[in-house]
Amino acid sequence: MKAPVVSVIIICYNYGKYLSEAIQSIVDQTYTDWECIVIDDGSTDNTKKIATEFAFRDARIFYIHQQNSGPSAARNTGLRVAKGEYVQFLDADDYIHPKKIEEQVVFLRNNPDVDLVYGDVITFKDIANEERFFYEFKYATKQVSGGEAILKELVWDSVFLINTFVVKKSLLERLAYFDEDISRHEDWILWNKMALSGANFVYSKRETTISYVRAHEGSLTSDKKEMWMNRIDARLKLENYIPLLLENRPIDNCIKDYIKTNAYLLKRDRYRFELFFGSIAKGLYFLVYVALTSSKFYEHAYDGLYWIKERMKRKL
């Protein structure tokens, strides 16, 4: 049997109530040469029922159940069985424009030097007994292309969400997929690994490649404290990955700036976290170190006071 061109990987953990819309947005794609792999990450709701009903009706859809292991492990399970040349990820509570896959596959076909093409996001919210509410603003996707430009942005934060792109599967294989030792920011780590390895990213602005992301309290980004802790862990991970990823790449000024910036942001995030959530003494230690080594003493002093003030507000 001929392998599909695109493998769509949908991970789902107790989001059965949203899953139908996510899968249907793949079924409705104008591009039809795809497979859709639904990874049930140990759900206890109706995820299996929804996914298997779609699989019964459409032979391109596959259902895989695994013990709850987190989003990285779930996506890696999908990648290990994926047969496509390209990969489209989709979270079970979101959906994509009907022409998204077609537009981005055509772009990659026409630009073989590009490894990943991404587009915009619009967030929406379901309101009881009312029409769906779409936010007037788009998610702050960074509209940058190329290797160095992306690297300069990624060291600060993610430039896109996981639903927004189509990527060459060979690139993901070369970088050993997602790091399963971290439960959040795992996607951001992989994007950084891609950029550090020299991958070519391109932003393509088209209304037909929009990804629609649901805003709700149950989303993975709801726990700010844990997200912040994981962000610090992610920067530590990157420090370990950097030497391995740069073994066969020249250390130019862009790379030097990246390494310096990541080290600086790691220490800054540490003092902010400690001043807001943890030990004030430890926070002040990191603060003084960053302030002295960055030659921005007063800027960081004011920043530290801000986070101590926010800590006091939180405890009131």
Image (cartoon, grey):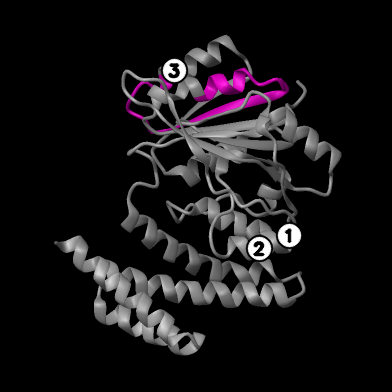
Dot 3 alpha-carbon crowd within 10 angstroms: few under 14, some 14 to 19, many 20 or more:
some
Return the residue at label 3: 50
Q: Quadrant of the C terminus?
A: bottom left
Dot 1 alpha-carbon crowd within 10 angstroms: few under 14, some 14 to 19, many 20 or more:
some
Left or right position of 98 against 230 = right
Sequence-wise first label, 1 or 3: 3
Q: Quadrant of the N terminus?
A: top right
In 3D space, how far apart are the residues under numbered discs 2 and 3 (Cα atoms)?
A: 39 Å
Q: Amino acid at mark 3?
A: Ile
- What residue span does the magenta drawing correspond to? 22-48
Specify the label residue 147 is tagged with.
1
Q: Nearer the viewer, mark 1 or mark 3?
A: 1
Left or right position of 195 against 220 = right
Left or right position of 213 against 201 = left
**Residue at x 38%, y 72% (from the top left corner):** 270
Residue 118 screen position, x and y as percent? 67, 43
Residue 80 screen position, x and y as percent? 61, 39
Q: Which residue ends up furthest to the left in the rendered image?
A: 316
Residues at badges 2 and 3 in contact (C-beta under 8 Å)?
no
Q: Is residue 308 magenta?
A: no
* Picture quadrant where residue 62 is located: top right
Q: Nearer the viewer, mark 2 or mark 3?
A: 2
Helix, strand or loop at disc 1? Answer: helix
Return the residue at label 2: 151
Residues at badges 1 and 2 in contact (C-beta under 8 Å)?
yes
Q: Amino acid at mark 2?
A: Leu
Left or right position of 306 against 232 = left
Residue 212 screen position, x and y as percent? 53, 33
**Residue at x 68%, y 25% (from the top left corner):** 99
Q: Is residue 35 magenta?
A: yes
Helix, strand or loop at disc 2? Answer: helix
